[in-house]
Amino acid sequence: APKRLRVFGGSSVPGLAKEIAEYVGVGELSDVTLKKFADGENYVRIEQSVRGCDVVIVQSTCEPVNENLMELLLMIDAARRA
């Protein structure tokens, strides 16, 4: 696997994300902070630089669709800004 590959997992399928990271040879998932505020808003922070890296985000859009999709979109945005 390329040295510059980063795999991040959302909260919907953490086990699958970990298996994918192991399968592609990066070992462990990259660090991401996922929080939900009391008012229901999501918080996503990529905890390492991904500049120049290939990024894979593993997140299902199963039930609850709105929450999982919003988390995926926030993870994409956070990765673009990290």
Image (cartoon, rainbow, N blue to C red):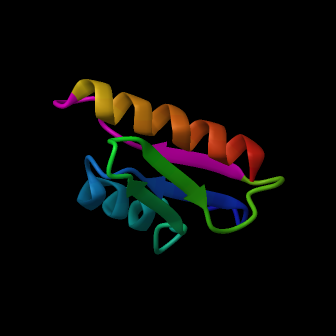
In the picture, measured across the screen, residue 33 lies left or right of residue 37, that is right
Nearest the viewer among 23 and 7 is 7
In which quadrant is the N terminus drawn? bottom right
Residue 7 percent coordinates (x, y): 52, 57
Residue sitting at the far top: 66
Query: Most extreme residue toward the front, as rendered?
Result: 39
Kindly identify the residue that appears in the image at 16 percent across and 30 percent down. 63
Q: Is residue 40 above or below residue 26?
A: above
Q: Is residue 24 left or right of residue 67?
A: right
User: Which residue is the extreme one toward the left?
Assistant: 63
**Residue 58: within the magenta?**
yes
- Name the residue located 82 percent from the left edge and 55 percent from the top edge: 51
Work out whether 61 lies above or below 15: above
Tally the numbered discs: 0
Q: Is residue 54 left or right of residue 70?
A: right
Position in image of residue 75 (x %, y %): 54, 43
Residue at the outermost right position: 52
Left or right, residue 36 beside residue 26: left
Magenta stretch, residue numbers: 54-64
Coordinates of residue 48 in the picture (x, y in percent): 69, 68
Q: Quadrant of residue 5?
A: bottom right
Q: Is residue 43 magenta?
A: no
In the image, residue 14 lies at what x, y percent? 29, 58
Residue found 26% across the figure and 46% down from its top: 12
